[in-house]
Amino acid sequence: MDKLTILADSAKYDAACTSSGGDREGGFSLGSTVAAGCCHTFSADGRCVSLLKVLFTNHCIYDCKYCVNRRSNDVPRTAFLPEELAELTIQFYRRNYIEGLFLSSGVVKSPDHTMELIIRVMELLRYKYQFWGYIHAKAIPGASPELVYRLGLLVDRISVNIEMPSEDSLKLLAPDKTRRAILSPMGRIAGGLEENKREIALYKNAPRFAVAGQATQMIIGATPESDYQIIRLASGLYEKYRLKRVFYSAYIPAVSDRLLPSADTKPPLLREHRLYQADFLMRQYDFAADEILSDKTPNFNPYLDPKCNWAINNMQNFPVDVNTADKETLLRVPGIGPTSSRRIISARKTGRLDMDALKRIGVVLKRARFFIITADHPRGLALNKESAARALIDPGSFSYGMEQLSLFSAAGLPGPGDIKSLKEAAEEAVLCTASRLQA
Amino acid sequence: MHGVEASGVIYLYDGGLKGLYCCVYESVYEREIPCAIIPESEDQPSLFARKRIVTDPGKASRVRASIPKKISQRALELVEHGYLTCIEDKEMAILKFLLMAYKTGRGAADMLGHPDVDRLFKAERHLMREVHLLKGFIRFSDYDSALGAVITPKNFVLPLLQKHFIMRYSQEDFIILDKVHKAALIYQDRKRQLIPVEDIRFPEVSEKEELYRGLWKQFYRTIAIEARENPRLRMTNMPKRYWENMTEMSELL
């Protein structure tokens, strides 16, 4: 039991947890995968748990400054036996505790040696246990392309952590993991995905390579990059490496070091939240990174989610007629998301939509009503700046506490010393936002 | 179809889907809308007249076949899902939807702005959300001869869970007992059946089973990041009513 505690504890800071992307029917062995993913439980921090997320071992020859398992840190070290881990995965899976396995590892002897051990676990699961549930494996930076490819054939998702949002930060905090050592396997994986697409087109039963694609993860808040730099990087990674997901992990002090933020730093949770919001905008709402932030405004607004922020800065695009606008335009309206826009387009085939219909469809009218034209409001709603501001402000901004707001360096907003309470901060935010709304 | 009147009659039926289709048949051909449709077993004394609707398989299949023909496949899905939901007046909601849909035609089931469609749609959504959550929250125990699980859902979800778990455990035998609806899904020797049961007494839990439960609880406790503790978020995502059947949560109740 100690082994599991140590190796699960070490893995918990790895943010990726989804089990989505794979769609395998099953039927001939143990296990199937569900395309939309499946949450089996939620931990005390409210996050979804769908995979057995562990390190194969927390021994490590590297000394990355932020990592609790860094070589120079004195912690109990242990390792699974491949058989042991495979058996544990199977028994958890049979009880419906998990959708599958998420395996990372410290680096033992060398990247390739570690990869061989990880591959051994996967081979046991797939071939001995006939397990076809979901597997997400981390490729070790610096691993040889052949091993990366072999691993890709055994798993659903494969990822390499990019760790830091810039090469400078990487050199500073994780010098053992060079930029090349990270990007090279990512390139190999992207190449493998491309090749596999062609193979499958030619030969239907070609072995599948990482059906759930490639993902990556970076730590936010340990280093000084702006939000703009981060989302531009994410956007570039999505494009260049055909990533399915980028995960942003708020820095949590696990070790002290003079190069790291102080040990009582609170994790930048609100900032992480904004990054995910921006990430979803780029992936599902067709926003470009440059529309969300810019060199002039390199950081998120703490009080507004990025979409509302964009809307306020681009009022010339509104009001939008819900009965005629296309999907892309509907998606720009605060309060209308991919599901609502689909339903609007479907419902309006049989009649013009009014506010009541939109409400039943699930549109967040509290926000949307200021930006749309409907059958019963052909000239849109008159914009009362203060009520619009109240509706657009992200109530979530205040649920992380005062400290989170003070971590933001958004221009034009009062600094931490000026705000006395969350309530005052909220009122301040309303006034500030209202004044930005054009007539 | 015109001249349908609201009548002061209560339809009594056998509680089954075929019986419900027969109620629809009756309403359409007698040109009346009952004020309620109730399973016979749940009948309560009241001032309203009763009409006992006999389940005739011929009538039922005529109604069922007419839905995709006159309306759409989606309408049929909406009706059959509606039947599984837990809303009090599901029978009347289905009848009202069908009466409206027969008149409207092909697009009826997509008219999410219409209250009769909306009622059924929202009930279906509640049902599907529960199905989706349960796929993750169901906990099995290994009783050596088979895997067994207990659920206490609001909606009648077993028919919609079948496919998922049969695909997941195609090589195993398993039972899922729905304590609320007194039914069980049994999968044995690659054959499935969904049958009414009063109760199932599962055998004693083995040492191996205790071991894995313990490991899972340990894993569950370990993975929470203290600096991000958020019981409210956990509750929103995982309502307390599911906890009693989840081994890692039941001791927190």
Image (tube, coloured by chain):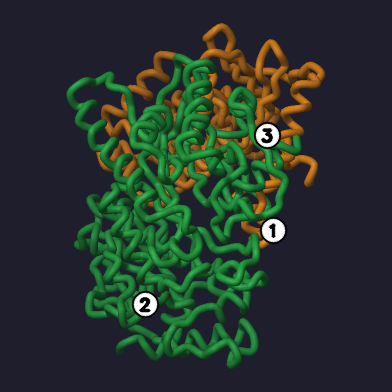
Chain hosting mark 3: B
Chain hosting mark 2: A
Q: Quadrant of residue A250?
A: bottom right
- Residues beneath discs 2 and 3 located on the same chain: no
Kindly identify which numbered label has been placed on residue B226.
1
The image position of residue A437, as x and y in percent, is 35, 86
Per the image, label 3 sits on a secondary structure element best described as: loop
How far is mark 2 from mark 3, CA to CA? 50 Å
Per the image, label 2 sits on a secondary structure element best described as: loop
Q: In which quarter of the image is residue B49?
A: top right
Chain corresponding to orange in the figure: B
Residue under numbered circle 2: A298
Q: Which residue is drawn at 30% across and 76% down?
A: A294
Kindly identify which numbered label has been placed on residue B152.
3
How far is mark 2 from mark 1, CA to CA? 30 Å
Instruction: Decide which of B21, A230 is in the foreground and name it.
Output: A230
Q: Can residue B27 be seen in this view?
A: no
Amino acid type, mark 1: Glu
**Which one is in front in this view, the residue at disc 2 or the one at disc 3?**
2
Q: Which residue is drawn at 54% across and 78% down?
A: A407
Q: In which quarter of the image is residue A279?
A: bottom left
